[in-house]
């Protein structure tokens, strides 16, 4: 794991507990490599954890704040993005999950051996929040423009000349 922060649900109480997670430099470098980013400049995860004993579950909600650098998919120019996203996930103890049908329609995960990794959850949320196809403003249109099909291109059929040769025979 590039970034890990483990909690033990059996030690949680019914009151909400807050964690602020800040990966070290080496962890941010490893995460950037994992997700194909050029760099993760800033990455903070604010997490609230609350046990739901009646359901053998733990509700994890929080917010990620990050500044990442990705390359434009067209021009490869570095693009800096700010990510400010909230998330909420319910974790269910796998030993009490008989079937998935009893779960609400919401997002859920399972945990086992009394361990939930909040660091990995934050890393996954960062990856989901990042733009999968980042494009530099203006430059992307300029670079891709010559390859766009226009109405004029549709009128000029590329095989029209071949059709003329065939008719001459």
Image (cartoon, helix red, strand yellow):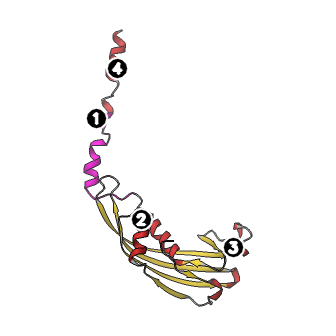
Please determine whether, in this image, residue 135 is positioned above or below residue 84. above
Residue at position x 42%, y 59% in the image: 132
Q: Is residue 57 left or right of residue 41?
A: right
Nearer to us of marks 2 and 3 is 2
Residue at position x 56%, y 80% in the image: 6
**Looking at the rendering, which quadrant does residue 154 occupy?**
top left
Q: Which residue is mark 3?
A: 94
Residue at position x 41%, y 65% in the image: 33
Comes first in the chain, label 4 or label 1: 1
Q: Position of residue 53 (x, y in %)?
A: 68, 84
Comes first in the chain, label 4 or label 2: 2
Looking at the image, the residue that sits furthest to the right is 98
Q: Judge whether residue 64 is colored magenta.
A: no
Comes first in the chain, label 2 or label 3: 2
Q: Which residue is mark 1?
A: 152
Q: Secondary structure at mark 1?
A: helix
Q: Secondary structure at mark 4?
A: helix
Q: Position of residue 20 (x, y in %)?
A: 46, 84
- Look at the numbered discs 4 and 2 and tell me whether their residues touch, using CB distance below 8 Å: no
Nearer to us of marks 1 and 3 is 3
Q: Secondary structure at mark 2?
A: helix
Q: Is residue 79 left or right of residue 96?
A: left
CA separation, marks 2 and 3? 31 Å
CA separation, marks 4 and 2? 50 Å
Q: Which residue is mark 2?
A: 33
Comes first in the chain, label 4 or label 3: 3
Nearer to us of marks 4 and 3 is 3
Q: Is residue 108 left or right of residue 40?
A: right
**Residue range of the region highlighted in magenta in the rendering:** 133-153
Looking at the image, the residue that sits furthest to the top is 169
Q: Which residue is mark 4?
A: 162
């Amino acid at each position: 794991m590039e970034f890990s922060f483990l909690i033990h649900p059996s030690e949680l109480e019914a009151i909400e507990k807050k964690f602020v997670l800040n990966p070290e430099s080496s962890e941010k470098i490893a995460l950037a490599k994992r997700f194909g980013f050029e760099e993760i400049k800033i990455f903070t995860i604010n997490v609230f954890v609350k046990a739901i004993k009646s359901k053998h579950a733990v509700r994890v909600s929080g917010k990620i704040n990050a500044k990442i650098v990705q390359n434009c998919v067209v021009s490869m120019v570095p693009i800096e993005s700010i990510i400010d996203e909230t998330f909420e996930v319910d974790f269910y103890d796998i030993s009490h999950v008989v079937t998935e049908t009893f779960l609400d329609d919401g997002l859920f995960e399972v945990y086992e051996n009394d361990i939930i990794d909040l660091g990995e959850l934050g890393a996954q949320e960062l990856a989901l929040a990042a733009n999968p196809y980042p494009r530099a403003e203006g430059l992307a249109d300029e670079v891709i423009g010559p390859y766009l099909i226009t109405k004029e291109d549709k009128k000029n059929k590329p095989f029209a000349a071949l059709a003329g040769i065939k008719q001459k025979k």
